[in-house]
Every structure is written in C-alpha cells, then in structure tokens.
Amino acid sequence: MPANKLDAHVDNLIPGKTYQFRVKAINKAGESAPSDPSRPLLAKSRRLPPKIDRSMLSDIRIKKGELINFNVNVEGEPNPRCTWSLNDTPLSSGDRTKVDNTTNNNTKLRTRDAERSDSGRYKLVATNEHGTDEAEVNVVVLGELLGGWGF
C-alpha cells in the first residue's frame, strides 16, 4: 500500500460487536511494532436507508377503552426520523396519545382509552438522508354492545 494511503477496510466484522485495532507499518525495512490498541469501536453499518421491522406491526381489533400500542424497531444510519399518521392525519403526543421516538432504532405509539374514532389505517414513515420506508397497519376499535350487537 502506498505511504500516502491512510485508510483501510476490515471485512467480516459482526454488527453490534465492539472491536479494538492495532496497526503495523510495513516497508522495505520490514514490519514495525504494533501500535497501541485503538479506542473500542462499535461495528455498525453506515449510510443505510431506513428499514421498518414489519414483524412488529399486525392489524388489531380491540374494544373501546382498551390500549392501542405499537412498539416498532426501525433500522437505518443515520437513525431515521419516524412519523405516525392515522388516515393520513399526522399524529403527535396529546391527551390520550403518546408518540415516543427517543430510543435509537425504535418508535412507539400508544393511545389509551381507545375510541371508535381511533379506528383506521395507521402509517409509519421512517426517513433519513438515504431513503424512506413506509408501513401500514389497520386498527378496528369495536363499540359497546347494544342489544347483543357490537356497533
């Protein structure tokens, strides 16, 4: 490798594992002694578009007054910005609803005391500078029983 080339590529690292590196100079005189170990470095992919873990999203049917709860892992680098909507109306934290994007690679949506108006198509959109991923899930909130029929 030419003396002015100061970078390298290391294959077969396991994502999520921490590594330390030591380097040696090699020239006509031979190999140098290894350097001191680097600071610990976490192996992770770089410049990845968002990817929503759809296994954590399933259509649900609940009774009025129950909890709507989604806890979804979202990968990407840099960490994606996640937004939720209900029937194309953006959702944010309020009286009964809480949107939590404070944990890296995860987003949560919780609506307590579900009402019939909380029924519909929920959409999660994850975006970073490398792309966008979208996933949808349907929620049906069943009303109270009236005369033996759920309306």
Image (cartoon, rainbow, N blue to C red):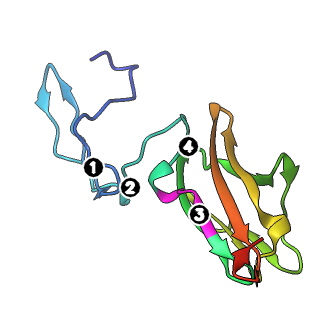
Quadrant where the image shows the N terminus: top left
Q: CA distance from mark 3 to mark 2?
A: 41 Å
Give, as a three-letter code, the residue at label 2.
Answer: Leu
Can residue 25 be found in the magenta stretch? no
Mark toward the start of the polypeptide (1 vs 2): 1
Q: CA distance from mark 4 to mark 2?
A: 16 Å
Give, as a three-letter code, the residue at label 4.
Answer: Glu
- Count of all numbered marks drawn on residues in the image: 4
Task: Name the front one of labels 3 and 4.
Answer: 3
Q: Is residue 76 left or right of residue 114?
A: left
Q: Residues within 10 Å of mark 2 (few under 14, many from 20)?
A: few
Quadrant where the image shows the C terminus: bottom right
Which residue has dot 1 on it?
Answer: 21
Q: Is residue 91 left or right of residue 19?
A: right
Mark 3 element type:
strand
Mark toward the start of the polypeptide (3 vs 2): 2
Callouts 1 and 2 close, C-beta under 8 Å: yes
User: Residue 8 at x, y = what percent?
Assistant: 33, 30
Q: CA distance from mark 1 to mark 3?
A: 48 Å
Which residue has dot 4 on it?
Answer: 77
Task: Name the front one of labels 1 and 4.
Answer: 4
Span shown in magenta: 56-61
Let me know if residue 69 appears in the view: no
Of 20 and 88, nearer the camera is: 88
User: Residue 63 at x, y = what percent?
Assistant: 67, 78
Residue visible at 72% across and 74% down in the picture: 150
Callouts 3 and 2 close, C-beta under 8 Å: no
Give, as a three-letter code, the residue at label 3.
Answer: Ile
- Compared with 90, 101 (above or below) is below
Mark 2 element type:
strand
Which residue has dot 3 on it?
Answer: 60
